[in-house]
Image (tube, helix red, strand yellow):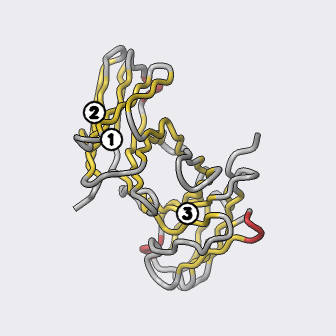
Amino acid sequence: KNEVEQSPQNLTAQEGEFITINCSYSVGISALHWLQQHPGGGIVSLFMLSSGKKKHGRLIATINIQEKHSSLHITASHPRDSAVYICAVRWERRALTFGSGTRLQVQP
Amino acid sequence: GAGVSQSPSNKVTEKGKDVELRCDPISGHTALYWYRQSLGQGLEFLIYFQGNSAPDKSGLPSDRFSAERTGGSVSTLTIQRTQQEDSAVYLCASSPGWAGYEQYFGPGTRLTVT
């Protein structure tokens, strides 16, 4: 059983829609990362957070430590947001454990 | 400044051969990580280096895999006697330290074992 669960696995949205991707993990963590991977491209780190909320442009990441849950939101989605979004967590003294990713397609 | 670079970008090798994959981290980054992404699969941790500490090799799938980091900078991942199941994209990342830092990923090396 993967210790990091993402949902949905696949998501298709229309341009302009508000998008939410969810990540749940099994035990307390020291940090959670959200990563973006474009088709055929490399991986970009979007956020690293251990509490609260972070915002960068149209992207917002939140984490609820008590619920062991994080969400990545995209406001006013655009076709260029189409990518795989990956949640990864780090437990103390361990390397990152990755979710299986959410494949997002934003249609014009 | 320059990001994480990896070479080669693509490598095709015959089953049974040894391969070496190279990673140049961002200058000054003390932590370096190797990951693997098999076709249609998620990311998988292989090994990480932090400063002068002993590397964490807990993710290496078999003793055919090894890695070294010379002078605290460049790292080489070596796969001996390659098997078809080793075919994957091998990604390197670096960060300024071990804890509390974002990781910066290289473009990856796509390894195909025929």
Q: Residues within 10 Å of mark 2 (few under 14, many from 20)?
A: some
Q: Residues within 10 Å of mark 3 (few under 14, many from 20)?
A: many
- C-alpha separation, residue under disc 3 versus residue under disc 2: 29 Å
User: In the picture, residue B62 is in which quadrant?
Assistant: bottom left
Residue A21 image position (x, y, % from top left): 30, 34
Residue at point 24%, 54% (across, down):
A26
Amino acid type, label 3? Trp
Q: Quadrant of the C terminus of chain A?
A: top left
Which disc number belongs to residue B29?
none
Q: Is residue A107 left or right of residue B81?
A: left
Residue at point 41%, 45% (across, down):
A32
Q: Chain of mark 2?
A: A
Q: Is residue A108 left or right of residue B87?
A: left
The reply to the same-chain question for discs 3 and 2 is no
In this rendering, does residue A9 appear at all? no
Pick the front one: B94 or A53: A53
Amino acid type, label 1? Thr
Residue at point 32%, 41% (across, down):
A102
Q: Quadrant of the N terminus of chain A?
A: bottom left
User: In the picture, residue B81 is in which quadrant?
Assistant: bottom right
Pick the front one: B1 or A29: A29
Q: Chain of mark 1?
A: A
Tag 3, which secondary structure? strand
**Residue under label 1:** A102
Residue A77 image position (x, y, % from top left): 39, 19
**Residue under label 3:** B34
Q: Residues within 10 Å of mark 1 (few under 14, many from 20)?
A: many
Amino acid type, label 2? Leu
Mark 1–mark 2 CB contact (< 8 Å): yes
**Residue under label 2:** A11
- C-alpha separation, residue under disc 1 versus residue under disc 3: 22 Å
